[in-house]
């Protein structure tokens, strides 16, 4: 502070350390002395000692002059006796970050993003959270609110160029935090919350936002989180969405703020004149507990595997979807009709066409013929297993997909099994 801006004699007020990375607001109070044109100065420095005008490579200092009315009742305080300046705290050795400009800018702390030129969006290293800071503030090239490194998206999505900052729509900040808190780095399987600080136009009733995540930021396939949301009001708003981090070391989240409500299309972004899409890339550690569990399961029988002969270990469980598809393709050419189809249009209706088409043996509803066998199981067995070890249709299983037994078991059928495969006599 100086009480005479025309001939400044700077009086130090305080020296404060930044409370965190990214955008911060720091407040300092003081008593206004006697003087017409006064000034305050903020000297922002990287390391170094307190100074009225430091000159480091990353330092910044700005003055603000203000006019003060004279107070006729003001009595200036007595000039205090000079005091010994405090001994400055020595800088720890070694210095943790470079002060030489040739060494480049200091790295961003893990929880605060820095712009990644390759990905085209802000990116955080490993940390308990990820904050875009000021890197997403604004939208496109709108008046008074040009967004840095626009459009800050991983694909071809662009921002709408129409409007004015903090009158019309913009996404200003995105933060990803672990829902349960804690100091550990974000890890696969963590439930996280996306918090978007946005500006909604008017009453906000015409503005909507979508949230997405992608498990691979280098080749994003976007999954929408929940339903589209409407701004709860006009002006500055905070909106959230939560999801569980899938496997993937470099993931991304997206917020898409729009005027109106349009289809997001294949790129998962609405790109109207007032719309804003922003991505934030996060580093995610592997879940070592999950990996250990999978490794253990691969060498021991799974409690879920009760299919006879075909699937014996939980390592085989990944084949279930393929086997189910194979079985479905085999069965669609047989006597199993589509549910609810009575065959009146000549299609695969109940009782209208058998496996051999017109002129073949006629099916009776959804019941299987004498050569149709089933297995009651939770997982899809092989076709050969059904024929070899299955049973002829009975009260337990009379149609494909029918519930049987406990723990989610259902009926799996195979048509055209050779009669007597299991030593039983088939019946019509």
Image (cartoon, rainbow, N blue to C red):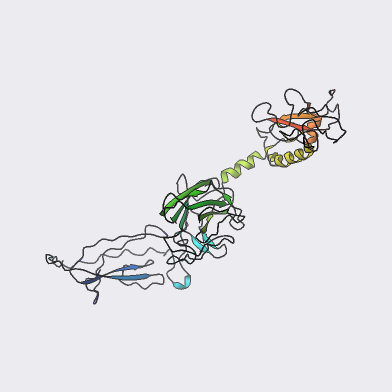
User: What residue appears at the point 41 percent right and 51 percent down from the top-left corner?
Assistant: 233
| Quadrant showing the C terminus | top right
Horizontal side of 240 relative to 422 (left or right) equals: left
User: What residue appears at the point 45 percent right and 55 percent down from the top-left corner?
Assistant: 198
Horizontal side of 254 relative to 355 (left or right) equals: left
Residue 247: x and y, percent?
59, 48
| Quadrant showing the N terminus | bottom left
User: What residue appears at the point 63 percent right and 42 percent down from the top-left corner?
Assistant: 294
In the depicted view, which residue is nearer to us: 98 or 46?
46
Residue extending furthest bottom?
A: 7
Horizontal side of 318 relative to 101 (left or right) equals: right
* Quarter of the rendering containing residue 54: bottom left
In the depicted view, which residue is nearer to us: 350 or 418?
350
* Quarter of the rendering containing residue 426: top right
For the question of whether residue 18 can be seen, the reply is yes
Residue extending furthest right?
A: 359
Vertical position of residue 319 compared to residue 116: above or below: above
Residue 369: x and y, percent?
81, 28
Vertical position of residue 120 compared to residue 405: above or below: below
Vertical position of residue 290 compared to residue 73: above or below: above
For the question of whether residue 193 can be seen, the reply is no
Residue 345: x and y, percent?
77, 37
Tell how many labels: 0
User: What residue appears at the point 24 percent right and 69 percent down from the top-left corner?
Assistant: 11
Residue 316: x and y, percent?
70, 40
């Amino acid at each position: 502070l100086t009480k005479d801006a025309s001939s400044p004699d700077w009086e130090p007020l305080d020296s404060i350390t930044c409370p965190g990375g990214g955008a911060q607001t720091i407040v300092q109070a003081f008593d206004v002395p006697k003087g017409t044109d006064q000034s305050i100065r903020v000297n922002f420095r990287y390391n170094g000692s307190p100074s009225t005008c430091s000159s480091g490579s990353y330092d910044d200092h700005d003055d603000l002059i203000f006019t003060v009315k004279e107070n006729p009742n003001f009595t200036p305080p007595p000039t205090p006796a000079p005091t010994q300046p405090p001994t400055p705290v020595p800088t720890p050795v070694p210095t943790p970050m470079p002060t030489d400009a040739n060494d480049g800018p200091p790295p961003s702390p893990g929880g605060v993003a820095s712009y990644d030129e390759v990905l085209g969006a802000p990116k955080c290293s490993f940390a308990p959270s990820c904050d875009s800071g000021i890197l997403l503030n604004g939208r496109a090239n709108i008046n008074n609110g040009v967004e840095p490194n626009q459009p800050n998206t991983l694909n071809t999505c662009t921002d709408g160029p129409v409007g004015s900052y903090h009158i019309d729509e913009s996404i200003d900040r995105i933060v990803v935090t672990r829902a349960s808190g804690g100091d550990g780095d974000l890890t696969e399987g963590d439930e996280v919350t996306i918090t978007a600080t946005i500006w909604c136009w008017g009453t906000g009733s015409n503005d909507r936002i979508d949230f997405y995540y992608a498990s691979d930021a280098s080749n994003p396939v976007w999954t929408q989180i929940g339903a589209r949301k409407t701004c709860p009001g006009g002006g500055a708003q905070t909106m959230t969405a939560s999801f569980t981090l899938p496997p993937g070391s470099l993931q991304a989240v997206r917020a898409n703020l729009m005027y109106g409500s349009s289809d997001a299309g294949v790129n998962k972004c609405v790109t109207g004149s007032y719309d804003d899409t922003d991505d934030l890339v996060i580093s995610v550690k592997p879940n070592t507990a999950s990996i250990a569990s999978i490794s253990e399961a691969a060498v021991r029988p799974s409690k879920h595997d009760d299919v006879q002969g075909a699937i014996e270990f939980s390592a085989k469980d990944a084949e279930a979807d393929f086997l189910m598809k194979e079985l479905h393709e085999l069965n669609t050419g047989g006597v199993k009709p589509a549910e609810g189809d009575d065959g009146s249009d000549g299609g695969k209706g109940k009782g209208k066409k058998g496996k051999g088409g017109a002129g073949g043996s006629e099916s009776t509803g959804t019941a299987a013929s004498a050569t149709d066998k089933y297995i009651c199981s939770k997982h899809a067995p092989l076709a050969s297993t059904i024929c070899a070890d299955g049973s002829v249709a009975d009260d337990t299983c009379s149609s494909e997909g029918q519930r049987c037994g406990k723990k989610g078991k259902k009926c799996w059928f195979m048509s055209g099994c050779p009669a007597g495969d299991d030593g039983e006599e088939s019946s019509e």
